[in-house]
Image (cartoon, rainbow, N blue to C red):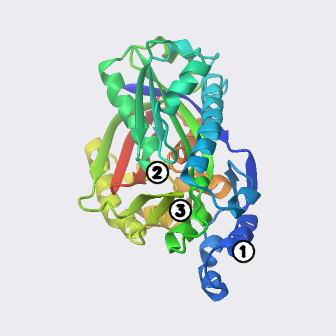
Amino acid sequence: MAYILSTGLQQAEYEYSQDTVQSLIYNLFPLKSHEKKRLLPIFEHAQIDKRQFSASMEWFEDPHGLKERNELFHEKALKYAKGAIKSCLSNLQFLKQEVSPSMIDHIIFVSSTGINTPTLDTYFINDLNFKETVKRTPMFGLGCAGGTSGVARAFEWLQGHPEKNVLVVCVELCSLTFQLTDQRVSNFVGTALFGDGASAVLMSGECSKLREMAALTTAKVLNSSSRLKPSSTDVMGWRVVDTGFEVIFNKSIPRLVKSFWSLHMKDVLAENLWEINELPFIVAHPGGRKVLEGYKEVFELSDHTLKFSENVLRNHGNMSSPTVHFVLYEAMASEPEKGTRSCMTSLGPGFSSEIVSLEWM
C-alpha cells in the first residue's frame, strides 16, 4: 500500500478575472466580430471566476516563437515547482514537522507544456539539495491525466519499495500556448479554460518512517487503474508548430465522459465492491464545466460530491496536470473521517482515463 501524507500548491503570480481575460481575447482573437460574439458564451458559461497566469496580459498581445515561450516556461515552471515542493514538505496542516528533501527516494515529475533536456526535475533537485541517489521518472505528454497518473505510478513503485518515499511534482503553464493567429475554436476554448500552476504530493510506503509524520488522517491508496481508448489520439493534445503548441480539443470529450469514462469508473467501483453513493466526494479533475456535468449525469451525483472540483475550477481554471492535486488539497484539508472512501480521477490525451482508489486511515 501507499499513503498520501501532504500536498503543496503554487499559484502563478498574475491573477485575472474571467471578465478581464474575455475582454482581452475578444480584442485579440483573429475572427470577425460576429464570429467572436457567437463564441463568447464559452467564457460566460465556463463557471470560472478567476485564473492565474505566468505572464501579464500585455505579453499575450504580441507574437512569440517556440524558443521564447520555452525559455519563459523554464524560468517560471522551475520557480513554481520549487514553491510547490517547499509548500508540500513544510505543510504543518498535514505534517507534524517539516520533511527534509533528503528523505525523498524517488521524484516523479509531470509536465506537458514545455520542453527541457535535462528535464526540469534535475534543476530543482540541485537547487533544493535532494540527495544524489534520488531516482527520477519524468513523465511528458499526459496532459490533464498526469496528476492522477503520477500518483498511480508512485503507488505502484511503493508496492515494491514499502520503506521508501516518493514526491510527485506537476507543473504546467497552459496559458503560454495561446496562439495569436490560430482561428480554430480549440484555441478559443483553451483561452476560456486554461490557467497556470504547480503541485507536489508526498507519498510514503507501508513501512516508511515518514508515516509517523502525518498530522491528520491520511489517504491510503488502495489500487490504481488505467484505460486507453483505441484510435482516439485526435481527441486532445498539442500540435507542435513553429510558434509553439496549438491546442487540440475535440467536441466529443463530454460524450466520452458519459461513455468511456463511466464504464471505467463502474469497473473500478465493482472491483472495490463499492457503490458510488458511498463516496461523499470524488477527487475529480475539473477539465471544464461540461466534463463536470458529464460526471454528474452518468452517476446522478449530488452537487456536494464534486464541490472541491467545482471550487478549483472556479478559482483557478484548468491547469492541466496539477489541477487534480488542487482538488486533493481541498479534500485533505476538509479532514475526512477514518473510513472515508473516494476516487481520484483524470482524463487526458490518448484518449486516456486514470483512476486511483482512496480510503482515509
The amino acid type, in three-letter code, at marker 2 is Cys
Please state which of residues 277 and 86 is positioned toward the viewer in this rendering.
Answer: 86
Instruction: Give the label, 1 or 2, closer to the camera.
Output: 1
Q: Secondary structure at mark 2?
A: helix
Reading the image, the residue beneath label 1 is: 27
Task: State the residue at coordinates (52%, 45%).
Answer: 114
As drawn, the label of residue 167 is none
Is 46 on the left-hand or right-hand side of 115? right
Query: Which x, y percent locates residue 278?
Result: 42, 48
Instruction: Give the label, 3 or 1, closer to the camera.
Output: 1
Instruction: Give the label, 3 or 2, closer to the camera.
Output: 2
- Near mark 1 (Cα within 10 A), the count class, few <14, some 14-19 or many ≥20, is few
Q: Earlier in the sequence, mark 3 or mark 1?
A: 1
Q: Secondary structure at mark 3?
A: loop
Please state which of residues 166 and 53 is positioned toward the viewer in this rendering.
Answer: 53
- Near mark 3 (Cα within 10 A), the count class, few <14, some 14-19 or many ≥20, is many
As drawn, the label of residue 288 is 3
Reading the image, the residue beneath label 2 is: 144
The reply to whether the C-beta atoms of the residues labelled 1 and 2 are less than 8 Å apart is: no
The amino acid type, in three-letter code, at marker 1 is Asn
Q: Earlier in the sequence, mark 1 or mark 2?
A: 1
Query: Which x, y percent locates residue 74?
Result: 59, 38
Q: Earlier in the sequence, mark 3 or mark 2?
A: 2
Examine the rendered structure and indicate whether residue 100 appears above or below residue 92.
above
The amino acid type, in three-letter code, at marker 3 is Gly
